[in-house]
Amino acid sequence: MEYAKKLVYLSNKWYNDGLKKANIRDLSGAVISLEKSLRYNRNNIASRNLLALIYYGRGEVAEALVEWVISKNMKSQGNIANYYIKKLQEATGE
């Protein structure tokens, strides 16, 4: 397997593991898996957005915002991070 393809494969494997853990509310385990996913592929937008959502759910709003901003800078169109950033900005204004 080509090296770049293997990295993408491993990143997606860890993303799927993180998603599975998030679904059963193992948030600490999900964070570890998603961070591993991003080590293999920093451009994995799904991993970055899910990691941000978990951070937000744990009350770590600043960390979540950092991940969403990075995600938005990687892909500005059709990225759910835009929605979450907008919601945070609206909540801050209240």
Image (cartoon, helix red, strand yellow):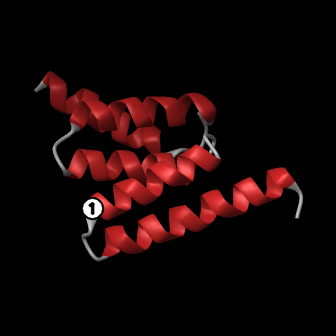
Q: Which quarter of the rendering shows the C terminus?
A: top left
Residue 70, position in %: x, y? Answer: 50, 30
Q: Is residue 44 visible?
A: no
Q: Residue at x 55, y 54 (%)?
A: 37
Secondary structure of the residue carrying tag 1 is helix
| Circle 1: residue type | Leu
* Residue closer to the observer: 31 or 87: 31
Which residue is situated farthest in the right direction here? 2
Q: Residue at x 28, y 37 (%)?
A: 87
* Residue closer to the observer: 11 or 49: 11
Q: Residues within 10 Å of mark 1 (few under 14, many from 20)?
A: some
Q: Is residue 59 above or below residue 47?
A: above
Label 1 sits on residue: 27
**Does residue 46 appear to the left or right of 68 in the view shown?**
right
Q: Is residue 39 above or below residue 34?
A: above
Residue 8, position in %: x, y? Answer: 71, 56
Q: Is residue 92 visible?
A: yes
**Does residue 61 appear to the left or right of 41 in the view shown?**
left
**Does residue 65 appear to the left or right of 42 in the view shown?**
left
**Does residue 12 appear to the left or right of 2 in the view shown?**
left
Which residue is situated farthest in the left direction here? 94
Q: Residue at x 46, y 54 (%)?
A: 34
Residue 64, position in %: x, y? Answer: 32, 38
Residue 52, position in %: x, y? Answer: 36, 45
Q: Which quarter of the rendering shows the N terminus?
A: bottom right
Count of marks overlaid on the render: 1
* Residue closer to the observer: 2 or 56: 2
Q: Residue at x 43, y 36 (%)?
A: 68
